Amino acid sequence: MLAAVAAPIIALALPSAPAHATPGVLVFPGMEVRQGTNVCTLGYVDPQMRIAFTAGHCRGNGPVSDRDGNPIGSQALFRDNTPNGATVDTNHQIADWEAINLAPDVAINNILPGGRQLIADPTIVPVVGMPVCHFGVITGETCGTIEAVNNGWFTMANGVVSQKGDSGGPVYNLTPDG
């Protein structure tokens, strides 16, 4: 079982997603998502609320789709104040998230591509040295530790890598039960 290190809790009243999704499309954490010309990784998925999250800088024009171009939902809200081209560290006050309303006809689960279930646990508090993993569509799963914590977010190092396309992917802590 996996426990999410942090997940935004948003919106009980987000507008409905368009009903244009291809029946049978499965939406899950760690999948490739596209918006306009941007390619990123889907982070957390809430099957009950039918909302998913990715990085705010992944937003683009038009619907959110899977790698094959099948619409899966639409952007509901986002925040993105990431400095363009600058190195970001924990001294910055960053907001970089996008909430996606999932289409009514897509299937949803919270299983990572490797088969592990992703479960949010708000009791887990990130601390320096805590083991974490990140899943991205380019690099797959990489694991390391939390390097620094400040301003409500953290940086990762010691094995966690990320490339263009991995943005928005889930960050999680492996729990003792797997």
Image (spheres, rainbow, N blue to C red):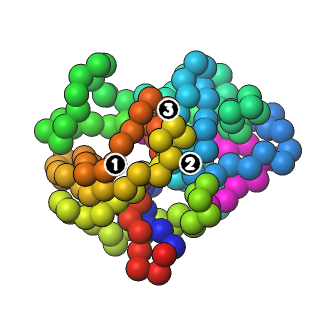
**Residue 56 to residue 155: above or below:** above
Image x and y of residue 106, in percent: 77, 48
160 magenta-colored: no
Q: Residue 30 shows which numbered tag?
A: 2
C-alpha distance separating marks 3 and 2 = 11 Å
C-alpha distance separating marks 2 and 1 = 15 Å
Instruction: Tell me the SS state at disc 1.
Output: loop
Q: Point out the residue furthest to the right here.
A: 23
Image x and y of residue 41, in percent: 53, 40
Instruction: Check whether the beta carbons of the residues at disc 3 and disc 2 lie within 8 A of each other.
Output: no
* Residue 104 seen by the camera: no
Say which amino acid is labelled 2.
Gly
Say which amino acid is labelled 1.
Val
Dot 2 or dot 1: first in sequence order is 2
Image-quadrant location for residue 111: bottom right
* Residue 149 seen by the camera: yes
C-alpha distance separating marks 3 and 1 = 15 Å
Q: Point out the residue furthest to the left here.
A: 91
Dot 3 or dot 1: first in sequence order is 1
x 70%, y 55%: residue = 108
Image-quadrant location for residue 4: bottom left
**Residue 112 to residue 67: above or below:** below
Q: Nearer the viewer, residue 151 or 166?
A: 166
Q: Which residues are magenta?
A: 97-111
Say which amino acid is labelled 3.
Gly
- Label 2 or label 1, whichever lies nearer to me, is 1
Left or right of 92 in this view: 30: right
Residue for badge 3: 165
x 65%, y 22%: residue = 62
**Residue 154 to residue 36: above or below:** below
Dot 3 or dot 2: first in sequence order is 2
Residue for badge 1: 160
